[in-house]
Image: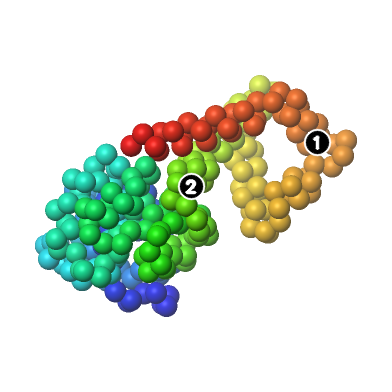
Amino acid sequence: MNANARAGTVALVGCGRLGSAILEGWLKTGAVDARDLIILTPSDKPAAEAARTKGARVNPASAALSEARALVLAVKPAMWREALTPLAGDLNPDAVVVSVMAGVAAADIGAVSGRPVARVMPTTAVAQGQGVAALWSADAGARETARGLFAAMADVVDLDLEALIDAATANAGSAPAFIHAFVQALARAGEAEGLPADAATRLARGALRSAGASVGTGETLEALIARIASPGGTTRAGLDAMAATGDLDRAAGAAVRAAVQRARSF
């Protein structure tokens, strides 16, 4: 069992896509034992039911929140006040609130909860124990509590300023979808060159897996590119063609800026 397990009750509020991914990651890595979990969800969720079979409490009486050392807020940003306000009075005085919501300032959450707040922006790959998570808190204790909840299933990247959370959300939290979209475009390009649609998709997905595996070596991105792109070879020709269009940097910049602006609009 992980050293963090059985270290105190953790409440998860919200079990949508991200909340479910976090829950699955906790159970997979042992970062939080199911018997130490309180899950609050307005509708049945497979991840919550799986946790229930292992000892988690799903939608218990609100008084159970007095046991929680941490409350992880994983609801939609537009609904956070509605979700948190009724719970604040039942929270343990020493509890920490960990927000995984985009665009909601820690000060606002702290004003409602009356507790220290940490903000974490994880990718959904935490479900497989392979995520990355940006972390910020003005409170050292809250920061360490949040780190303990995510370190086993994500590479936790500390940020010095809360203002950087929105950029981190776009650069990591949203970026897997951007990368999948590019791989989808590569599959269409392969099909345009004569590959059957199924073959082009399988090959493009395989390329994504290969790229992901190489990232685990810890080499710089430049070194990983150079390892494949021999001078005068096919890969270098493709990279040069992408650079000549100028579209790759523009597309990435536009995607990140739009995601940042959207996060700031909540």
Image quarter (top left, top right, bottom left or bottom right) of the C terminus: top left
Q: Residues within 10 Å of mark 2 (few under 14, many from 20)?
A: some
Along the line of sight, which residue is nearer the eye, 189 or 153? Answer: 153
Residue 182 placement (x, y as % from top left):
59, 33
Image quarter (top left, top right, bottom left or bottom right) of the N terminus: bottom left
Q: Which residue is mark 2?
A: 164
The quarter holding residue 35 reads bottom left
Along the line of sight, which residue is nearer the eye, 132 or 126? Answer: 132
238 vs 184, left or right, is right
Residue 52 placement (x, y as % from top left):
24, 63
Between marks 2 and 1, how big is the CA–CA gap? 34 Å
Along the line of sight, which residue is nearer the eye, 49 or 263? Answer: 263
Q: Amino acid at mark 1?
A: Arg
Q: In this picture, is 46 found above or below 187?
A: below
Q: Residues within 10 Å of mark 1 (few under 14, many from 20)?
A: some
Along the line of sight, which residue is nearer the eye, 104 or 32? Answer: 104
161 vs 186, left or right, is left
Q: In this picture, is 173 found above or below 204?
A: below
Q: Residue, x 40% and y 59% (percent of image)?
A: 137
Q: Residue, x 33% and y 76% (percent of image)?
A: 7
Residue 71 placement (x, y as % from top left):
28, 61
The quarter holding residue 53 reads bottom left
Q: Which mark is residue 236?
A: 1
The colouring scheme, among rainbow, by chain, secondary structure or one colour, is rainbow
Q: Amino acid at mark 2?
A: Leu
